[in-house]
Amino acid sequence: MFNKFSVIITAGGTSSRYGNTNKLLEKIKDKTVIEETVSKFVDFENIDEIIISANNSIMDILEDMFSNPKIRIIEGGNTRQKSVYNALQAVNNEYVLIHDGARPLIRKDTIAYVLEAVVEKDAVSVMTKTTDTIKEVDAEGRIIRTIDRSKLYNTQTPQGFKTSIIKEVHEKLRDGNFTDDCSMLEHLNIPVYIVNGSYTNIKITIKSDLDFAKLYI
């Protein structure tokens, strides 16, 4: 008997930094961004539910877009944290992965690593080692110091959790405004472990990101 997993796809944003259209509905070849993202998870046999926590303005579009019985569309909240909280109420499995709807370039082998690691570690996040030199800068724009990058990583998604742990954390910090689920565990001193990701697993935020995604795919 193998473990069953749920996946939460966050789609509650308004794409304010992207422009006048919702970036999740933009096309990458013959699929929208959200369709490309969901397609990376849907064929895993041990993932038996995918919950898209969506902005109310696109719920009807998503309902028409997805007919797979694995996929459910629910209404998100006015922050990412609230959108995830709403989706967690619908999760039925022991483990859950939380992934940004705007990260369509996630690799299936990375997802497989997260599925394996979360069962062993209870809380994991896909991350990549920072390659740029990082500077701390003051309010006047003056460089204060160079930060040692040897221990610095860039956070991505999916992030995977034992469902009971992430639900309890969201209840305890329900009035907060965290933009990252792992940071909520860190706030409560709950260990989170890394899964090495890919530098191509970008989040589409501005139009040039979409151009990159088209080139990569």
Image (tube, helix red, strand yellow):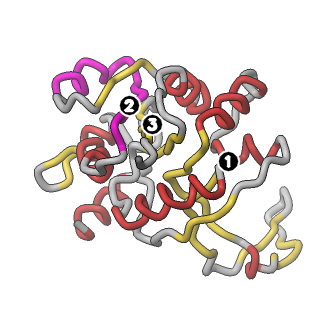
Query: Looking at the rendering, which quadrant does residue 50 occupy?
Result: top left
Q: Amino acid at mark 2?
A: Ile
Q: Nearer the viewer, residue 143 or 182?
A: 182
Q: Earlier in the sequence, mark 1 or mark 3?
A: 3
The residue tagged with tag 3: helix, strand or loop?
Answer: strand
What type is the residue that disc 1 sits on? Cys
Q: Secondary structure at mark 2?
A: strand
Number of marks present in the image shown: 3
Between the residue at mark 1 and the residue at mark 3, the CA separation in whole angstroms equals 14 Å
Give the spatial CA distance, label 1 vs label 2: 19 Å
- Which residue, given by chain and number where applicable, does mark 3 sit on? 8
Q: Are marks 2 and 3 in contact (CB under 8 Å)?
A: no
Where is residue 133, by image quadrant? bottom right
Q: Residue at x 74, y 81 (%)?
A: 150
Q: Earlier in the sequence, mark 2 or mark 3?
A: 3
Which amino acid lies under the numbered mark 3 shown in the image of this protein? Ile
Tag 1 residue: 182
Single out the residue that lies furthest toward the left: 30
Q: Residue at x 88, y 72 (%)?
A: 144
**Region rendered in magenta:** 47-65
Residue 52 on image: x %, y %: 38, 31
The image position of residue 16, as x and y in percent, is 45, 36
Residue 48's place in the image compared with 28, above or below, is above
- Quarter holding the C terminus is bottom left
Looking at the image, residue 101 sits to the left or right of residue 157; the answer is left
Residue 154 in the image, given as x and y percentages of width and height: 61, 65
Residue 3 is one of the magenta-drawn residues: no
Left or right: where does residue 120 sit relative to residue 174? left
| Side of 35 where 56 appears, left or right | right
- Residue at label 2? 52
